[in-house]
Amino acid sequence: MPFQKVTPEKLSTSVVRQIEQLILRGILRPGERLPSERELSERLGVSRPSLREAIADLQDKGLLTSRAGAGVFVADVLGSAFSPALIRLFGSHEEAVFDYIAFRRDMESLAAGRAARFASDTDLKVIDTIFRKMEAAHPKRNPNDEAQLDADFHLAIIEASHNVIMLHMMRSMYELLREGVFYNRSMMFKQRTTRSDLLEQHRTINTALQSRDPEAACAAIVAHLTYVENSLSDQAKALRNEEVAQQRFAHEQER
């Protein structure tokens, strides 16, 4: 018969499973420092030896890493999504920018539809709270703050979709966006013609999600990212035109 005796699970195994789930669900993030050994053992209700055994297991799996004198951190599990060579290639070719936006448009429209259906009330409160911060930041005209809140807003939608594969994939994509690999988001927020438009687009997305309207949420994401795509295309053309104009001006001065 295919039955085996049930044996009690080791405490360290329970700890491993709990921390794995926190990482998988995106609650513990890459680079985040775990509490001290004493505090963590108290929170989990296990002895320090059991905790050390669990931490060692998670380090062997590549999920945690220790830093001398600093503590134990969640490993940079997103860093392996793209090789350094591919990241450099992304950054040096304009077409990658527009492929990236098209990819985001496809993935985030799906995520928005899922979030409208499956998000908990707390998920929607998180999204709404971030949008209210975007409203508050708008008059201050700090492009870095606005760009960061923009990323937080979109990632909150991904999180609210409750698909862990999509969550980790999109987080890795947003890390590259934060590093300016695809485009400088701060530049978009400096353009007077786009700041108010972008805020209103995020308002439309938030309203659709709060209403739990999957079709409207999906359409709002598509409209927003199409606007971003067109704005970046216009910006690229303007930069090329300015380069030609400067050449003409320099030549005119030499005549």
Image: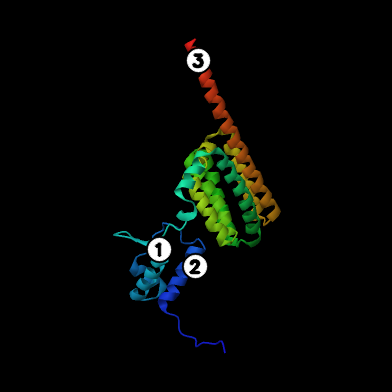
Q: Residue furthest top?
A: 255
Estimate the x, y position of residue 150 in percent, counting from the top left.
Answer: 54, 46
The residue that appears at 38% across and 76% down in the rendered structure is: 46
Q: Which residue is mark 1?
A: 64
The residue that appears at 58% across and 61% down in the rendered structure is: 163
Disc 1 residue type?
A: Leu
For the residues labelled 3 and 2, say whether their Cβ atoms are less than 8 Å apart.
no
Disc 3 residue type?
A: His
- Within 10 Å of disc 1 (Cα), the crowding (few <14, some 14-19, many 20+) is many
Q: Which residue is mark 2?
A: 21
For the residues labelled 1 and 2, say whether their Cβ atoms are less than 8 Å apart.
no
Q: Residue furthest front?
A: 85
Can you say whether 113 is above or below 87 in the image?
A: below
The residue that appears at 56% across and 42% down in the rendered structure is: 96
Estimate the x, y position of residue 228 in percent, counting from the top left.
Answer: 60, 40
Can you say whether 242 is above or below 46 in the image?
A: above
Image colouring: rainbow
Residue 180 in view (yes/no): no
Instruction: Tell me the SS state at disc 2.
Output: helix
Between disc 3 and disc 2, whose residue precedes? 2
Q: Residue furthest bottom?
A: 1
Q: CA distance from mark 3 to mark 1?
A: 59 Å
Q: CA distance from mark 1 to mark 2?
A: 13 Å
Q: Decide which of 2, 202 is in the foreground and name it.
A: 2
Q: Which residue is mark 3?
A: 251
